[in-house]
Image (spheres, rainbow, N blue to C red):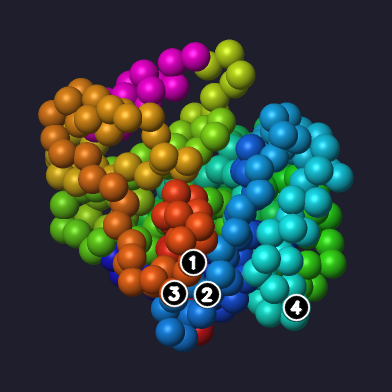
Amino acid sequence: MNWQDLKKRWGLHERVHHVPFVTPVVALELQPGFVTGARLNPGKGHVERAGIRQLDAGALVPSPNRPNLTNLAAVKRAVGEVAALLGNGSDRLGLLIPDVSVRVALLNFETLPENRREEETVVRWRLREFLPYAPEEARVSYQVVAKQANGAEVLAMAVRASVLAEYEAALEGINGGPALVLSATAALLPLLPEEKTAQLLLHLCPGSLTTVLVVMNRICLWRTRPFTDESEDVAGEVVREGVRSVATCQDQFGTEAQRVWFCARPPAANGLKERLAGALGREVLPLRWDPASATGLSGDERETFQHFGVPFAGLLANPGE
């Protein structure tokens, strides 16, 4: 899929992000239960190293407005061990954070100011209704995805500055800190093929499910459903969310989601993909990435990458600048 403009604009490191980014050489992802990372060779399109460390339950609890790292020492230790496996140095560092910590909104405007600073102010002002904290506390990234005579559509991401500071603190001393910060699902988007029909992506991670609906190569729905410790029927929630999203595609956009992509990290329990396919009445496909990009890894590293590294494959699919 041609995500050039979108991929070049997304990143939450600056207060308001609107500059191109270069694909990182080292990427780390922090999620409830694990820290994983990869050393990438963007020029050759392959992965040189991959590693993972488990996190104790409760060490990282994602939230958009509350502290996320309840055991900073444990998280820093896991980050340091993964970084050591990848080779710590001065290479560009990318950081992927949980979807739950990031708010994503689709905003419609009758018009947008021509002045960039005024445009940023208007976008931030509109985001206030989607944020559980004051908008001036947000780090914002946005992209104008459609602009016509009768209006404009903006896809915006926001993360609370204090929350982002926690993740940055966990990376203190690692490659000089992150040059790029993305939500995990945002890193998957370059893997979606270019299609003229509607596509649905379901991304299951520990503690959350993110659903992205793409119609005619435009993101039309982005929803993250957090799971609590009391959420017993995660598989059932995945199926119900898939059914709701397919219905939304039909009711709001008058089209069928012809392709349904499913990505679960760690791999989902046996039968979940088949159960989802049965409920939706269509084939559910694993999100595709080029397996040749990981052929140089050792057996353990390749298994880690196959089970956890799909977002890193998405970063590789971004040609950067």
User: For the point 16% across and 39% down, which residue is it?
Assistant: 283
- Residue 245 falls inside the magenta stretch: yes
Magenta segment main secondary structure: helix
The amino acid type of the residue labelled 4 equals Gly
- At mark 3, the secondary structure is loop
The amino acid type of the residue labelled 2 equals Glu
Contact (Cβ within 8 Å) of mark 1 with mark 4: no
Q: Which residue is mark 1?
A: 298
Mark 1 or 4, closer to the camera: 1
Contact (Cβ within 8 Å) of mark 3 with mark 4: no
Contact (Cβ within 8 Å) of mark 3 with mark 2: yes
The amino acid type of the residue labelled 3 equals Gly
Q: Mark 3 to mark 2: distance in Å?
A: 7 Å
Q: Which mark is residue 48?
A: 2
Q: Which residue is mark 4?
A: 89
Q: Which residue is mark 3?
A: 296
Q: Quadrant of residue 243?
A: top left
User: For the point 33% across and 65% down, which residue is it?
Assistant: 291
Contact (Cβ within 8 Å) of mark 1 with mark 2: no
Q: Mark 1 to mark 2: distance in Å?
A: 10 Å
The amino acid type of the residue labelled 1 equals Ser
Mark 3 or 2, closer to the camera: 3
Q: Mark 4 to mark 2: distance in Å?
A: 15 Å
User: For the point 54% across and 34% down, which residue is it?
Assistant: 206
